[in-house]
Image: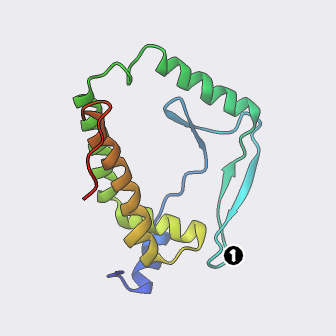
């Protein structure tokens, strides 16, 4: 599956920007405490980054931000067609960044690159595509298994 050489994957890994902050309310942010923890690659034992060590205060910030977005219905009140298009676009973005995402998974989790390229990342995109397709289907009906 991998079309790159080990050296090419390594060069790509060396150029990755690995974010270390939490994603809360549409932006990267440090943990409220400022604490971090080391993210070590199981592949070579090297430090990938120091990740924001979120705690209850950060969870509360994230939940409050999610609630403030949910309550006005920005997503839930959109038409099924609009939500479907957004999820389809998200799946396409995953497809477009397949190698980068697979490489990130590989160096973070120690997963073989071929597994991440062939299964994990495409599987994530396919799951999102499946959900997108389910959005505008007739309620309370299930398609027959063939």
Which of these two is toward me, 97 or 71?
Answer: 71
**In the rendered image, the vertical position of residue 90 relative to residue 107, given as above or below:** above
Q: State which quadrant residue 35 falls in.
A: top right
What residue is drawn where x is 40% and y is 17%? Answer: 73
Residue 34 to residue 113: above or below: above
Q: Give the camera-side residue of 127 and 30.
A: 127
Quick check: 115 above or below 120? below
Query: Foreground residue, 55 or 137?
Result: 137
Q: Residue at x 34, y 18 (%)?
A: 77
Tag 1 residue? 45
Horizontally, residue 70 falls left or right of residue 75, namely: right
Please tell me which residue is depicted at 39% across the width and 71% down the height of the picture: 117
Label 1 secondary element: loop
Residue drawn at 30 percent across, 22 percent down: 78
Quadrant of the snapshot with the N terminus = bottom left
Q: Classify residue 121 by image quadrant.
A: bottom left
Q: x, y (%) of residue 126?
A: 33, 55
Q: Position of residue 130 (x, y in %)?
A: 32, 48
Q: Is residue 108 above or below residue 31?
A: below
Is the C terminus in the top left, top right, bottom left or bottom right quadrant?
Answer: bottom left
- Left or right of 79: which side holds 47? right
Q: Is residue 60 left or right of residue 7?
A: right
């Amino acid at each position: 599956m991998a079309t790159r050489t080990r050296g090419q994957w390594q060069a790509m890994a060396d150029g990755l920007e690995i974010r270390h902050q939490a994603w809360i309310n549409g932006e990267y942010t440090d943990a409220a405490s400022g604490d971090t923890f080391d993210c070590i690659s199981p592949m070579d034992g090297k430090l990938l980054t120091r990740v924001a060590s979120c705690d209850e205060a950060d969870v509360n910030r994230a939940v409050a931000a999610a609630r403030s977005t949910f309550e006005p219905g920005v997503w839930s009140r959109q038409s099924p067609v609009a939500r479907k298009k957004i999820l389809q676009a998200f799946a396409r973005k995953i497809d477009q960044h397949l190698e980068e995402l697979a490489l990130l998974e590989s160096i973070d989790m120690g997963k073989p690159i071929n597994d991440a390229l062939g299964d994990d990342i495409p599987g994530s995109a396919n799951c999102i595509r499946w959900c997108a397709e389910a959005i505008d289907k007739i309620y309370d009906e299930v398609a027959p298994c063939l």
